[in-house]
């Protein structure tokens, strides 16, 4: 703060000069004292100057809260914002009117496409938005070096540079494979971040017992992968904080609040997060406001649930002096609402200015212009042809036993199964009757022309192809199709869109959703993206796809780190072996 | 941590290799989950590797806790360690066996004598001690520039340098006079510290209402000056944390815990501290262990009171990943005790090593050798004579009205009263019948020969002099005496001691306590210092001094910032005017 502003804060607090804004007649949710106080709130520039007795506050602008609650702006404690599918501008339009004023994001996805420049681009795009965007530095880009191709890489020097950025509050989710056993290149990142005093975040999926202890001993300080009460208790006992996740797919809150309501775990150690949440769900349900609300419905007190989205994350990330409470010297980020259970924001104030009312921003932000390098990230190196998707059988075989990816609906994991397949003219082709289709991952970053091929069961359609460039974590181009022509058509279409989702059948485009920003996000208005996404889902159903959310499913098939099997541009990955394996069993 | 150590922690946690130490059969006080867990504690080098099920832990050294509680090492959240009167070596001998393993100190006193070099000297003296010493950078040395002389000064550049020290966790107590109204030179210090991410500590004595709001708006984040429940509630509501103080003179705990036990203030926002506590009281009563114990007696739960000396300060000072809990990756600082109410440490472990048992350190630390510049800080510039203490009356007056400092026993404040005094041969002298004596403050830092003179009522003796170099915050040489001969004798004696306390009468030394380290601390064993201090108190009583703790009283008479009146080497200070004023009223 400038000396001038400090002097103005002090003068306004002491009543020597009027504040810029006074909010009268409100009940302040005091997250520190755990109390509800009838006060006038004085704001000078972007900060809170004072809470004074009702009627005592003088300000140039008077906001009459008419008895509403004043709630500190909500904080998202861990989110991959790219998963919304929309730009940060649109995210702000979506969530700020709901009272979310700070998001702590791990921009892991864009980093896989565009590296550190992609992260900087995101941050630069929010300069004029009424939303604070703070960063967990992606700690593992690529996730699986050597068995996948990414557009960007984040190395130790990048991390050193980012640690000097004012937006950085943490090193992002380091998963157990990097530290159990410890790998020097990742431990060096943890050590560097800790030396700078920032939090090092965890991702302790499936860990328990002594493995969890070992993981915690490296200083990884939180976890958003808990799915059971036992896990949450174990993590709190291990000295970790837990981000309870309630996003599009993972919905852990109802189960996990029982740690507090039944088992007496102090809510102090818990935070709300969404991790991944798509635009449609944000529109229909809400963002962290939903988590707070749902937490209350599940048995938390309103104070506990609000603390989990205010002072708990601000304390964890060493932001307590800046955000998370309505107390002197903090940013004036807050919303007014009539009912803490319903938690619907009437008026939202960010940095002392009214930025949203009745569910919408007061001023529509101008759409940022992104540079060409961020909008042209489809580097296939060639026009794709049917031959690029030909699966060649080993020489002189009439029948082969193939390793097939079997999709498990509703779960983020897949099985590897073994299927006998006929060989015709040296090729293995789809077998519709057994729901066996081709799957391909095409390098879209380095123009190598590399295509990883495999077979998949579980999509359910008869003809056509589905393709996407949203595919964790490498975000290459993934396709599932009935034959090479359909797949080539779909691939080339997506290339011309600059990335995105597409469905084709018999030479026709059934639906498409361009995501030209790094090939993973749209620049369009969220309403339009949501509508197009709904159309995509309908078209997929019409095409015969039996999965509820086929693009979400596609997005994890290229993950070489989630059990049991994945596909990258380099080939089929046996996750447990962390290695590329042949597609066919040796006969 | 080194990669080697992290690997060892992980291996021990997972059971692949034995830990260095296993503590078996203990009940871990889990300050995060607020629970008591029967676990084996595994330690590798200086860190905790894991908590495992009873009987599961393997270690090269086995400690059988025999059912005792394992409590995280206690943290002192705010202390002027110089007030103990002993060296840090002796402080460690005193408090580590009681389970205190970290002290966060504001070395304000030594900084007034020796500047930044004095602070570095303290820190260097603890390198081999089993005690973590962390620093709040003194923010106002001198406290009252222009109206007092100090030996050291701390400027913005010193603060910048100290902010790079690994021991620094905060900027120390900035008092309201520096920020209400805001003074640019002090605000710059706050801003610099906050930019480095360290906590900026407060000292909000007597503030309330809108003044407190104004004070908090500058980012000063805690206060240890609360004396009432109303004050504590107000501070928590203002977003500040409160260090509840229980030291030698200020005893606020019994009153203040009612904020929690009666008014429902979350203990989460509170910490224990002593601020100032003398060696005798540390010996008789204890240190932070006493505060925890007394807090429980006053109605806190053992968990709350222990949290106030463990995770609450570690969270506040961003030390949570290092100390304050018995969880993986944290320093293995703990003590075993049989009874949480009594909280008597049997065995104390610091950095994984048993350092104390049954009330004493296992290994007596070697006495550090201090450099001559730290032991020779009496710079009077001359041998003092009776004439140096002569109070000259204005010309041609037979009677004057003098401003007299009236001591208020048991309180840290004094009154200014007005007394008519006879003038004999141009001099004003002591008047035993009215208990009016001379008081002098001699510059001992710059050898200026400057002596500030005044009159005082309330010491109660008839003849002799009492002198001390422990005098906040400038630590000059202060004397109260019946005449110039006694005062000169006392002053010269203290000069030869290198500083300290002395009582003289009729040419005889009644008692003395040398404090040669910066003139404010002894190098001797704490037992000896305590014994000499007890002797001093007896001798003072025998001499006729009616004050219980005359040296504590002397120590605040030279404070130009505590109401209503003080005396510095520059003369009488009217505290409210913050200015030197004439000793006599104009007739």
Image (cartoon, coloured by chain):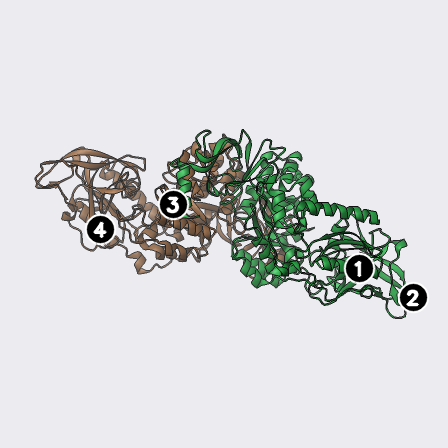
Chain colours: A green, B brown
Q: Nearer the viewer, residue B22 or A206?
A: A206
Spatial CA span between label 4 and label 2: 109 Å
> Which part of the image, by quadrant, shows the N terminus of chain B?
bottom right
Is disc 4 in contact with disc 3, using a CB cutoff of under 8 Å? no
Q: Secondary structure at mark 1?
A: helix
Residue A537, horizontal then vertical, whole percent: 77, 47
For the residues beneath circles 4 and 3, the answer to whether they share a chain is yes
Q: Secondary structure at mark 2?
A: loop
Residue A398: give its label.
2
For the residues beneath circles 3 and 1, the answer to whether they share a chain is no
Q: Chain of mark 4?
A: B
Horizontal arrangement in the rendering, residue B377 relative to residue A78 (left or right)? left
Residue A407, horizontal then vertical, whole percent: 80, 52
Give the labeled residue for mark 3. Answer: B174
Q: Is tag 1's residue or tag 2's residue first in the polypeptide sequence?
A: 2
Spatial CA span between label 4 and label 3: 35 Å
Horizontal arrangement in the rendering, residue B464 relative to residue A250 (left or right)? left
Residue B556, horizontal then vertical, whole percent: 30, 42
Give the labeled residue for mark 1. Answer: A489
Q: Chain of mark 1?
A: A
Q: Is residue A344 visible?
A: yes
For the residues beneath circles 3 and 2, the answer to whether they share a chain is no
Residue B493: give its label.
4
């Amino acid at each position: 703060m400038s000396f001038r502003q400090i002097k103005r804060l002090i003068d306004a607090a002491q009543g020597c000069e009027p504040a810029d804004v006074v909010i009268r007649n409100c009940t302040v949710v005091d997250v520190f004292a755990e109390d509800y106080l009838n006060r006038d709130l004085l704001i000078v520039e972007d900060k809170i100057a004072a809470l004074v007795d009702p009627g005592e506050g003088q300000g140039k602008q008077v906001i009459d809260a008419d008895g509403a609650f004043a709630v500190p702006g909500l904080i998202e404690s861990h989110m991959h914002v790219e998963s919304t599918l929309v730009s940060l501008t649109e995210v702000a339009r979506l969530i700020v009117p709901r009272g979310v004023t700070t998001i702590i994001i791990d921009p892991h996805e864009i980093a896989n496409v565009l590296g550190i420049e992609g992260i900087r681009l995101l941050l630069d795009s929010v300069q004029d938005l009424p939303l604070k965007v703070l960063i967990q530095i992606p700690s593992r880009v690529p996730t699986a070096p050597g068995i996948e191709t990414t557009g960007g890489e984040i190395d130790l020097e990048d991390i050193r540079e980012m640690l000097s950025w004012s937006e950085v509050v943490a090193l992002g989710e380091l998963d157990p494979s990097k530290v159990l056993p410890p790998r020097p290149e990742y431990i060096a990142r943890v050590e560097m971040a800790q030396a700078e005093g920032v939090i090092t975040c965890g991702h302790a999926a499936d860990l328990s017992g002594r493995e969890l202890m070992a993981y915690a001993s490296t200083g990884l300080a939180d976890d958003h992968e808990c799915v059971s009460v036992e896990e949450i208790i174990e993590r709190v006992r291990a000295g970790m904080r837990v981000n309870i996740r309630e996003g599009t797919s993972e919905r852990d809150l109802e189960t996990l609040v029982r740690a507090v309501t039944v088992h007496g775990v102090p809510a102090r150690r818990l935070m709300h997060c969404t991790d991944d949440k798509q635009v449609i769900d944000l529109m229909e349900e809400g963002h962290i406001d939903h988590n707070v609300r749902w937490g209350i419905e599940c048995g938390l007190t309103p104070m506990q649930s609000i603390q989990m989205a205010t002072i708990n994350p601000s304390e964890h990330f060493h932001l307590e002096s800046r955000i998370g409470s309505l107390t002197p010297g903090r940013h004036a980020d807050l919303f007014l609402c009539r009912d803490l259970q319903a938690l619907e924001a009437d008026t939202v104030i960010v940095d002392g200015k009214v930025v949203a009312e009745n569910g919408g921003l007061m001023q529509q932000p101008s759409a940022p212009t992104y540079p060409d390098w961020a909008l042209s990230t489809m580097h296939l190196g060639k026009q794709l042809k049917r031959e690029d998707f030909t699966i060649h059988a080993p020489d002189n075989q009439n029948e082969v036993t193939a390793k097939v990816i079997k999709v498990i609906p509703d779960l983020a994991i897949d099985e590897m199964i073994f299927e006998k397949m006929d060989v015709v003219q040296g090729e293995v082709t789809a077998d519709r009757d057994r729901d066996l289709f081709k799957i391909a991952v095409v390098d879209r970053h380095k123009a190598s022309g590399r295509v990883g091929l495999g077979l998949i069961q579980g999509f359910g359609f008869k003809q056509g192809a589905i393709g996407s460039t949203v595919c964790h974590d490498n975000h290459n181009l993934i396709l599932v199709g009935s034959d090479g022509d359909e797949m080539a058509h779909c691939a080339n279409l997506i290339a011309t869109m600059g990335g995105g989702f597409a469905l084709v059948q018999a030479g026709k485009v059934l639906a498409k959703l361009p995501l030209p920003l790094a090939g993973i996000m749209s620049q369009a208005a969220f309403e339009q993206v949501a509508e197009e996404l709904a159309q995509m889902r309908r078209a997929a159903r019409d095409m015969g796809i039996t999965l509820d959310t086929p693009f979400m499913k596609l997005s994890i098939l290229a993950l070489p780190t989630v059990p049991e099997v994945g596909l990258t541009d380099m080939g089929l990955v046996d996750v447990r072996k962390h290695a590329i394996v042949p597609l066919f069993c040796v006969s």
